Amino acid sequence: MDAAACKQIFDLCSQSLSSTENEKFFEACQLLCSVIPTISHDVFQSLPNNILLDNLGNLLKCRLRNEQRAILIDVYACLIEQHKSVSFLCTHNKNLFLLLVLLCTVELRMIVENHQINEILERQQHLAACYLIIEYTIAAICQSDDLTDDNVASVLPKLIEMFNGCVFLIDQIIDNAEDKQKFDTILQATVRILGIWLSQEPIALKELVEPRLNKWLTYGLNTPTCAETFKKFLEPILKCYEDD
């Protein structure tokens, strides 16, 4: 797909993103989630950095139903994955980016703190989209100048609450899930995002995580499908705690 065809699709979808009440809102979001990942890197780089962002940002500020917020977050995740960064969002409108992060933390808590653990299986793809946004947000916080200290302070408490939820989910799967193998993908993704955060902020959740680490590692290292992820993302944290 060339740049002209992409721009035509984006322009068409933008018209349907004028309002959440537009009957084609979901259709447009689903189309974007299907199309954006298929665009080649070179073609995507030739498009304006702010493409879709005005309409998406206007929607983000609306009162959204759960399903509307979810699909909107999925579209943002597709854009972020193409850019491999959140810098384009910070440059366009930093306040809207911070709002996206806050909404994403709310969305994740609703998923990972659900006591009906089997319901999480139905939302794996959306969970992955939320984790992707958080991963690139962590990079922006720790490895770039995109966010000021005040920006970080405005989202940090919600991020910490969200990671508390991730700890809850890991425990839920390891301790309570009947068919644990069904949750391997979710468990690995959750351990990965928690490990990325702890590698940057090891003290932030130490009191919560340290007593659980040996149990988690015992499970993960003895589960062939999970062993590599647990070893890569949790063993360095254990060593950090032991050296502290």
Image (spheres, rainbow, N blue to C red):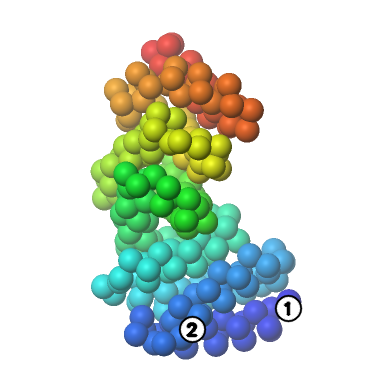
Residue picked out by circle 1: 2
Task: Estimate the x, y position of residue 76 in percent, counting from the top left.
Answer: 48, 65
**Quadrant of the frame with the N terminus:** bottom right
The amino acid at mark 1 is Asp
Dot label at residue 33: none
Judge the density around disc 1: few (<14), some (14-19), many (≥20) Cα neighbours within 10 Å.
Answer: few
Q: Position of residue 234 (x, y in %)?
A: 50, 25
Give whichever of 26, 2 is nearer the camera: 26
Report the front residue among 211 and 181.
181
Label 1 secondary element: loop
Return the residue at label 2. Answer: 14
Q: Quadrant of residue 54?
A: bottom left
Pointers 2 and 1 in contact (CB under 8 A)? no
**Going 63% across and 65% down the picture, which residue do you hit?**
37
Quadrant of the frame with the C terminus: top left
Residue in the picture at 35% in, 18% down: 211
Local SS, label 2: helix
- On screen, residue 241 versus residue 79, left or right, reads left
Task: Estimate how packed mark 2 is, as few (under 14), some (14 to 19) or many (20 or more) residues with alpha carbons within 10 Å.
Answer: many
Q: Is residue 183 above or below residue 237?
A: below
Mark before the other along the chain sequence, 2 or 1: 1
- State how many labels appear: 2
Disc 2 and disc 1: Cα gap in Å?
18 Å
Q: Is residue 93 visible?
A: no
Mark 2 residue type: Ser
